[in-house]
Image: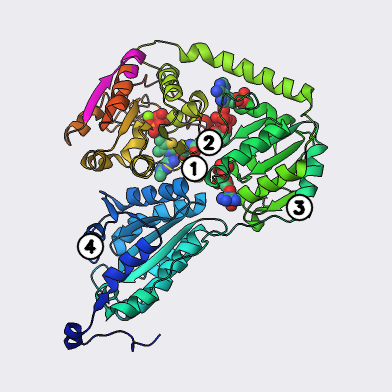
Amino acid sequence: MSDAAVNTKPEAEAEQDLTDGFHLIIDAMKLNGLDTIYGVPGIPISDFGRMAQAAGIRVISFRHEQNAGNAAAIAGFLTKRPGVCLTVSAPGFLNGLTALAHATTNCFPMILVSGSSEREIIDLQQGDYEEMDQLAIAKPFCKAAYRILYAQDIGIGVARAIRAAVSGRPGGVYLDLPAKLFGQVMDAEAGRKSLVKVIDAAPAQIPAPEAVKRALDVLKGAKRPLIVLGKGASYAQADDAIRAFVEKSGAPFLPMSMGKGLLPDAHPQCAGAARSTVLKESDVVLLIGARLNWLLSHGKGKAWGDAPKKFIQIDIEPKEMDSNVEIVAPIVGDIGSCVSALLAAMGGNWPAAPADWTAVVSKKRDENVAKMAPKLMNNNIPMDYYGALGVLRTIVKERPDAILVNEGANTLDLARGAIDMYQPRKRIDVGTWGVMGIGMGYAIAAAIETGKPVLAVEGDSAFGFSGMEIETICRYKLPVCIVIFNNDGIYRGTDVNPTGSPDPAPMVFVKGARYDKMIEAFGGVGVHVTSPDELKRAVNAAMDSGKPTLINAVIDPAAGSESGRIGNLNPQSKLKKK
Ligand code: OXT
Ligand code: ADP
Ligand code: MG
């Protein structure tokens, strides 16, 4: 690309209608419906944020880039448009990079836009302000990485970033904008013409008819079919087709954590409460937007039992097939198109799922639900997880359109089981990595993108990773109610330092901490509760008022277990404890 089209002569500015990098980036975003920026301002993007706001883009300014990045990632999940995160150079960029990698790992479309230093200084390593070869560093953590050097390439650069983020398997994209680009001036008309409106950014990917037939043949032959609904199915926004297909098949379905609510957890075919049984005993498993990764025990081993199993998989990413076990009937395409094709090919007289199998699943589910019911009704003080979750379960049932954000270990795993979901994309959580720190970023973006009330159920450790964003929540007056399950530590608050030294044990925090006081510093409502009744009143009041609220819910420090439901993943020393 030559410099010829870039007008750098000041005297020409008076005579010509001009634009510059700042305005072209803003115009390119607006042209493509990117109407919100999550970020942290500073050199070299301070003015860009101001100008974007002046131009009508919503600019949500955070306290730390990782939280802004997580907000952008979940905005992408919720809307199918790439969420945009804007950061300064090197340290700001690196703070945002974790979120970019998280978005890519979870298949959420997001664009991390970072200001950067000039190439000539970076390449000679001359020590610029916040110098770093950001493009090179970003590459392994995202789906695509681009740098725009010239104002006239902004239209194409933004278009490429959008397409890369949302087409095929969605993911994170890095867009590098050197400081000098913002000020580059060019003819306004030429600039306008250089912008690109992305047409059909995520084209439908229609499955091959023979793949659909192959899958239905396998499914029809099943004696114990199971459908697994992952967060890809939630992302696809093909809710009606998925529901119609699942119901027509009559098969039990198992929602993954963020697949919950696609069909209500209270649906008669839901096998969420009979997880072990359906994994072990099914003979044909149809995966819709769920990978056979650690969360599904890689499709093999003890969790899946001894009986031979056939897997059918719907995914937009062909390489996902056979990634862990053989997929006998791969259907490659977008979930909306694949599920619609399956439905159409099933015809009018698809056989009911074998009744002996659905009876086994229902029986197990009813047993597990009955086992949990009394625990959820307990009124113990100090509260245990179940007593507190029983209250939240009812509140979510009464307010099914609220968005539930959830992170922690016990706080996560027990809430996932106890709180039924009723609508798609209402539960957002730690995802594929089990990462702590998504909480406040997710809560903010969920409120901004959907306009719905948000209930964030947070372990006390989990909250700490993004807790400063309660100021952001208060500043933007968002309808977010945060409930901290405060058990004085990571998993439990009971560990002691065995040496007797005054240093606390590694897993515990200040005992009896009052997180509710923190939000009062920013004008939010803080409430301290010790019983399920108090918790119920406080959450309902917060959800009714829509005011930023933080509820410090005291949980018995001894109630949790190591790493929640995944304690088995901790390596154990074979040596005798000293
Ligand atoms: O069928 P069976 O009989 O087996 O029963 C199952 C279901 O059928 C049944 N069930 C039900 N019964 C009745 N009624 C209903 N409605 C119902 N629904 C289900 O219940 C059981 C269990 O069901 P489930 O949960 O579906 O099944 P299971 O077997 O657990 O599923 C397996 C998994 C793997 C799919 C599931 O467990 C899962 O999704 N797990 C995700 C786990 C995860 O991601 N955890 C987070 C990471 S833990 C750890 O890494 C933490 N760290 C380290 C750290 C991290 N993560 N990140 C960063 C950046 N730095 C460090 C930290 C610091 S957690 C953590 C903080 C923890 O402390 P906190 O204070 O925040 O939290 P507390 O623990 O509360 O103190
Ligand atoms: P979960 O953690 O809920 O099991 P995963 O994140 O493991 O879900 O899997 C989601 C899968 O969904 C990914 O393999 C991704 O390629 C796929 N996916 C995402 N969007 C679509 C879509 N629109 N059509 C088809 N597959 C999709
Ligand atoms: Mg805790």
Mark 2 highlights which residue? 257
**Magenta run includes residue 526:** yes
Contact between labelled residues 3 and 4, with CB atoms less than 8 Å apart: no
Bounds of the magenta segment: 525-536
Of mark 1 and mark 3, the one earlier in the sequence is 3
Mark 3 highlights which residue? 211
Q: Residue at x 44, y 43 (%)?
A: 435
Contact between labelled residues 3 and 2, with CB atoms less than 8 Å apart: no
Of mark 4 and mark 1, the one earlier in the sequence is 4
Camera-near label (4 vs 1) is 4
**Magenta run includes residue 89:** no
Camera-near label (1 vs 3) is 3
Q: Position of residue 9 (x, y in %)?
A: 21, 87
Contact between labelled residues 2 and 1, with CB atoms less than 8 Å apart: yes
Contact between labelled residues 4 and 2, with CB atoms less than 8 Å apart: no
Categorize mark 3 by other alpha carbons within 10 Å: few (<14), some (14-19), many (20+).
some
Mark 4 highlights which residue? 51
Q: Is mark 1 within 8 Å of ligand 2?
A: yes
Judging from the image, what secondary structure is the residue with disc 4 in?
Answer: helix
- Residue 143 at least partly seen: no
Kind of residue sitting beneath label 1: Gly
Q: Is residue 232 left or right of residue 470?
A: right
Categorize mark 4 by other alpha carbons within 10 Å: few (<14), some (14-19), many (20+).
some
Q: Is mark 2 within 8 Å of ligand 1?
A: yes
